[in-house]
């Protein structure tokens, strides 16, 4: 599918490198098909040492080289990255953005290039367990959509949505979502340590409980409330804990947090 295609990754930071790693791990491309482009030589040396891909400090040359051009810079860096590339991409190049908030229109206008996919992955992509949501401009043809699907599948699961407004919502749920779980993990481990468990043991208990619960929810297909009720014995330990969580308004706090991320994604899109 991606055989012989040239893929430029502009901004091979944490996520950009995850894309490179995923593509190579799944043997979807060979290292010489990838060009990582970053202004900092030391970063390029690290990426080169790990993946043996081509590297460059010249975004324009990289963008012109790529048949697929992936933008993985920070939202705050995007404007200055796009400006020199205006009207310079190959007409049939596929742009894939993972930049939070940045709209398809931002790319089409800044680059004068309509063939743009906007996506939102997450950090479990580092181990091929990501969840990515993506959408495409109408000018992205079927062949290019298949390329995008293959590239994003290298990160784990992916789903296509036909309305770009879902991308800001996805940013708040699956994009930022791992941080919510890591925070919960951290708090639970600390509580375990506070009670007297060794940290190493508390970590193992918490991580496997989270993993097992996620897999169980996925495989059983049951509503989370049903699964929760099955844990909650009358007058037992779980109901004592849940009562405290409800007293702390955990549902409202989580919903407010997710709405804050959603609003922030939309704000980033306007800046
Ligand atoms: N982290 C996450 O969980 C997720 C992030 N995203 C999105 O992915 C994007 C990247 O995030 P992340 O990987 O975390 O950030 P990083 O800071 O790790 O990656 C950004 C990379 O871009 C490089 N860079 C900076 N300026 C330029 C430039 N002018 N030209 C080319 N490259 C440049 C940076 O170099 P240097 O560091 O040396 O400045 C860095 O290597 C963001 O837009 C973010 O919204 C999407 C989903 C999840
Ligand atoms: O925090 C952020 O803005 C990025 C986007 C989703 C996850 N990290």
Image (cartoon, rainbow, N blue to C red):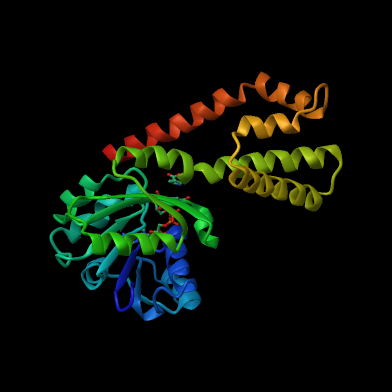
At horizontal 65% and vertical 45% (from top left) the residue drawn is: 216
Camera sees residue 148: yes
Query: Left of 193 or right of it: where is 149?
Result: left
The image shows a total of numbered marks equal to 0
Query: Left of 167 or right of it: where is 137?
Result: left
- Where is residue 195, by image quadrant? top right
**Horizontal and vertical percent position of residue 79:** 25, 50
**Horizontal and vertical percent position of residue 92:** 17, 66
Which of these two is toward me, 115 or 48? 115
| The C terminus, quarter of image | top left
Ligand 2 falls in which quarter? top left
Residue extending furthest toward the top: 247
- Where is residue 12, by image quadrant? bottom left
Camera sees residue 11: no
At horizontal 44% and vertical 35% (from top left) the residue drawn is: 261
Query: Left of 110 or right of it: where is 120?
Result: right
At horizontal 87% and vertical 41% (from top left) the residue drawn is: 196
**Horizontal and vertical percent position of residue 190:** 74, 41
From the viewer's perspective, is residue 120 above or below residue 21? Answer: above
| The N terminus, quarter of image | bottom left
At horizontal 53% and vertical 55% (from top left) the residue drawn is: 124
Which of these two is toward me, 44 or 139? 139
From the viewer's perspective, is residue 154 above or below residue 97? Answer: below
Which of these two is toward me, 27 or 172? 27
Which of these two is toward me, 144 or 252? 144
């Amino acid at each position: 599918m991606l055989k012989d295609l040239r893929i430029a990754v502009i901004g091979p930071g944490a996520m950009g490198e995850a894309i490179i790693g995923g593509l190579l791990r799944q043997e979807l491309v060979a290292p010489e098909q990838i060009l990582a482009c970053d202004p900092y030589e030391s970063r390029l040396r690290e990426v080169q040492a790990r993946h043996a891909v081509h590297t460059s400090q010249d975004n324009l040359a990289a963008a012109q080289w790529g048949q697929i051009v992936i933008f993985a810079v920070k939202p705050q860096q995007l404007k200055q990255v796009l400006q020199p590339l205006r009207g310079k991409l190959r007409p049939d190049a596929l742009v894939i953005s993972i930049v939070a908030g940045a709209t398809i229109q931002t790319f089409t206008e800044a680059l004068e290039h309509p063939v743009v996919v906007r996506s939102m992955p997450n950090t479990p992509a580092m181990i091929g367990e990501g969840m990515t949501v993506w959408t495409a401009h109408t000018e992205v043809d079927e062949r290019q959509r298949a390329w995008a699907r293959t590239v994003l599948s290298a990160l784990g699961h992916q789903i296509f949505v036909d309305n770009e407004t879902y991308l800001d919502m996805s940013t708040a749920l699956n994009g930022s979502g791992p941080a919510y779980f890591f925070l919960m993990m951290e708090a639970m481990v600390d509580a375990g340590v506070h009670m007297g468990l060794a940290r190493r043991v508390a970590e193992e208990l918490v991580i496997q409980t989270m993993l097992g619960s996620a897999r169980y929810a996925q495989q059983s297909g049951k509503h989370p409330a049903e699964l929760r009720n099955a844990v909650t014995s009358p007058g037992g330990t779980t109901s004592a804990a849940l009562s405290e969580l409800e007293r702390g308004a955990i549902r409202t706090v989580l919903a407010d947090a997710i709405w804050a991320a959603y609003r922030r994604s939309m704000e980033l899109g306007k800046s």
